[in-house]
Amino acid sequence: MTKLKDSKYDLAWLLNSFDPISLDGLNAKAEMLSRIDNKYVVRSDSLQKAIVEVAGDFEILDIDNCRA
């Protein structure tokens, strides 16, 4: 797999916008929750604005310091 060089594909800003949660932490938290998955396609500039609003309400799964 080739690594994309174009900065528009650099998602570090997105991955680092959320607090991390371990797999064990996620499993413990999710035990009592119903799961709903939503998927959206949005432009990068719109996503960057939205992340500021929602980052405090979500976490990102981090396994062995890998978030992607």
Image (spheres, helix red, strand yellow):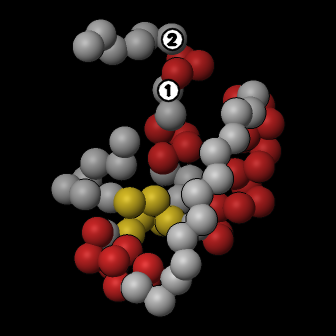
Q: Are marks 1 and 2 in contact (CB under 8 Å)?
A: yes
User: What percent of the width, then of the height, locates residue 64?
Assistant: 19, 56
Query: Residue 53 shows which numbered tag?
Result: none
On screen, residue 1 above or below 11: above
SS state under label 2: loop
Inspect the image, locate mark 2, and give the three-letter code of the amino acid beneath it. Asp
On screen, residue 16 above or below 11: below
Q: Nearer the viewer, residue 49 or 58?
A: 58
- Tell me: 25 left or right of 53: left
SS state under label 1: loop
> What residue would you read off at disc 2?
6
Q: Nearer the viewer, residue 25 or 12?
A: 25
Please name the residue shown 79% across and 44% down the image: 49
Q: Residue furthest bottom?
A: 32
Disc 2 crowd rating (10 Å Cα; few below 14, some 14-19, many 20+) is few
- Tell me: 23 left or right of 4: left
Please name the residue shown 44% across and 79% down the image: 30
Please name the residue shown 25% across and 57% down the image: 63
Query: Residue 10 shows which numbered tag?
Result: 1
